Each structure stands twice: as C-alpha cells, then as structure tokens.
Amino acid sequence: MQFLTPFLPGEKVPTSGDYWVVHLKHRLPYKAFLPEGERFPVCNQCSLDVVYEYAGDLHKGLDLSHDLDFQPRRASALGL
Ligand SMILES: [Zn+2]
C-alpha cells in the first residue's frame, strides 16, 4: 500500500505499519510502528509541526509509547 501525502497529528492511522516520523524542527526523521485505528500523536515539543509518512509493513519501527516526545499521548487534548 502506498500513501503519497503525509499524515498529520490527530488523523487516524489507516493501516498498521511503520511510519516516518518527521519533526519539522528538532529531530531527524525516524521510523515508528503505529497500529491501525490509532491517532497519529501530537509531539510534546513541536506540537502539530510533525508529519507522518508510510514507510512499510516490516513492523520494525520504534514504539512511540516509549518516546519521550510522545508521553503522554496528547491526541485527546486536541478534542479529536
Ligand atoms: Zn517534535
């Protein structure tokens, strides 16, 4: 499956897989695994200045629940 446009925080993860996490300001891109149906999380540091791009289904990405930039998950704070 291919997705051409990046996903934004608060959008639903369309399919389980690895996604490039691209913080626009403070970190280099890295891959994270996200399960289908979850919301792409808001970054604690750059807030909405983070985008996600589908990177494959190898399921080798980081677990964002262990990533300090995403603790606690704040998608619900957006009212989404
Ligand atoms: Zn960030």
Image (cartoon, rainbow, N blue to C red):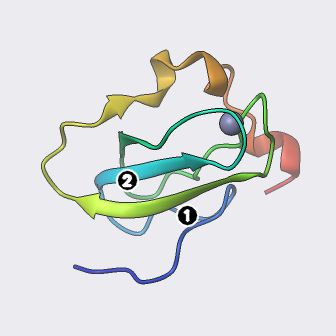
Residue 51 place in picture, x, y as percent:
60, 58
Say if 36 sits above or below 46 in the image: below
Residue 7 place in picture, x, y as percent:
56, 67
Quadrant in the picture for the C terminus: bottom right
Q: Secondary structure at mark 2?
A: strand
Disc nearer the start of the sequence (2/1):
1
Q: Residue at x 37, y 53 (%)?
A: 19
Say if 48 sits above or below 26 in the image: below
Q: As shown in the figure, which amino acid type bears the numbered disc 1?
A: Lys
Q: As shown in the figure, which amino acid type bears the numbered disc 2?
A: Tyr
**Left or right: 68 as drawn, with respect to 5:** right
Say if 75 sits above or below 64 in the image: below
Q: Residue at x 51, y 58 (%)?
A: 52
**Left or right: 76 as drawn, with respect to 66:** right
**Left or right: 6 as drawn, with respect to 30:** right
Residue 42 place in picture, x, y as percent:
71, 43
Ligand 1 located in image quadrant: top right
Asked which quadrant contains residue 61, the reply is top left
In this view, the residue in front, 40 or 4, is: 4
In this view, the residue in front, 80 or 42, is: 42
Q: Which residue is mark 2?
A: 19
Residue 18 place in picture, x, y as percent:
29, 50
Q: Is mark 2 within 8 Å of ligand 1?
A: no
